[in-house]
Amino acid sequence: MAEYQISTNEGGITQITISGAVASTDSELFRAFSHLSSSKCALVNFLELSEASEELFTRLEDVSSRTKIKVIVTKPEFVTKCNKIGLQTFPTTKSATLSHAGDETLRLLIAQLRDVPILNTEAYKLIQHVASPDANFPELEKMLQNNAGLCSQILRTANSSYFMRSSKAETLQQAMVTLGFAPLRQIFIYNFYNSVGNFFGVQKDTVEHGQDCAKLAEYIAQSAGASQAECAKIRLIGLLHDVGRQALAFFFPQQYEKVQHLIRVDKNPSYLAELVVFGTEHQSIGSILANSWNFPDYLSKVIADHHYLKATDWNKLSLPVFCANNFLNQRDGEPFSPYYHKLEGYFFLKRAELPWKDIDAEFNEFLARPQEF
Ligand SMILES: [Fe+2]
Ligand SMILES: [Fe+2]
């Protein structure tokens, strides 16, 4: 017979700790699962569990259809069984509790985001249209006709030297056809991000950090011989990489003060400080936002990975952003990760020679050059 104990942890989350061997006839234990069903989220602790019948996992799956469950477990066979029924597993109570807090942060953030006016902007509607399978130029033209700013931006870009038209694009249609959907989408995302930036307001430092990161990451990519298309993607990722941080700081200003304190005083990197306070970090939030706004896949993938660099398939895009970001953090006296080897790795990947002798001086000199954003 298994033993169990029900408790409530600091965060007010119900936890059931089960020890010993669970048989399929352990009806008292299964009845106790009803305590979990009455709360929104719960923890199940299997650290002392020695054996378990299939019935335990069937019952748990049933409870998980009503209550968000995180399981604390380390034995590989139980981890596999939990994952099979779609339950997240964690090695400690602390990590499982933080993960619940992260889910809650995300839920609150998404609920608040629904009420904000940014999703009514024209640029946002244009992004949605370009991302849809029936995107077409006549419809886009109709949507753009009253937006002089965007129209002239599209014409200017189509007539820039990069697109090498033999004659000037005179109409919006011609300009859009020259550009194609991917660059148009980038123009709309820049515009949308400007509205997001205005909406998120006073976070001047984060906005400037994004702009510097965009410029420097693009400079690194250009210096390694990346194509124009690749450079355009890298610039956009650089600009948006910390959008999750802006969102967290905007929606939860008091908690974000604690994060800033942990960064300043304890020298924690931003994402670790956020994990302690919110149970999630700005990379995950940024990636979820990018997905929910229908941005291209490369944006959400690289935003999600810009501190850890786990997804090596994205290295051609993520490495220049990683290097630029950490150079800027170092320059600004923020915690940073060493980036020199990653820079070498990126140039190796691009089969190019590192052109700089004194990286600090040359990056600073590049950033000081007057340039438009
Ligand atoms: Fe970041
Ligand atoms: Fe950053």
Image (spheres, rainbow, N blue to C red):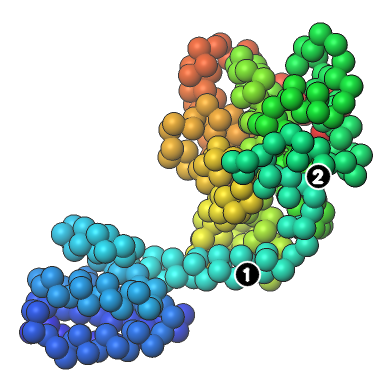
Specify whether tag 2 is near ligand 2 (CB below 8 Å): no
Q: Position of residue 225 (x, y in %)?
A: 61, 14
> Up-down: is 255 above or below 10?
above
* Crowd tier of the residue under label 1, counting other residues whose Cα lies within 10 Å: few below 14, some 14–19, many 20 or above: few
Q: Tag on residue 291?
A: none
Q: Residue furthest top?
A: 166
Residue at 41 percent across and 85 percent down: it is 39
> Up-down: is 20 above or below 200?
below
For the C terminus, give its image quadrant.
top right
Label 2 sits on what residue type?
Answer: Met
Q: Position of residue 302 (x, y in %)?
A: 54, 40
Residue that numbered label 2 is attached to: 143
Q: Quadrant of residue 253?
A: bottom right
Q: Tag on residue 111?
A: 1
Q: Spatial distance from mark 1 to mark 2, Cα to Cα?
A: 28 Å
Q: Position of residue 121 (x, y in %)?
A: 79, 53
* Crowd tier of the residue under label 2, counting other residues whose Cα lies within 10 Å: few below 14, some 14–19, many 20 or above: some
Answer left or right for 235 relative to 54: right
For the N terminus, give its image quadrant.
bottom left
The answer to whether one can see residue 258 in this image is no
Q: Nearer the viewer, residue 317 or 72?
A: 317
Q: Quadrant of residue 252?
A: bottom right
The answer to whether one can see residue 62 in this image is yes
The tag earlier along the polypeptide, 1 or 2, is: 1
Mark in front: 1 vs 2: 2
Which SS class for mark 2?
helix
Residue at 89 percent across and 32 percent down: it is 152
Answer left or right for 27 relative to 241: left
Residue at 20 percent across and 73 percent down: it is 58
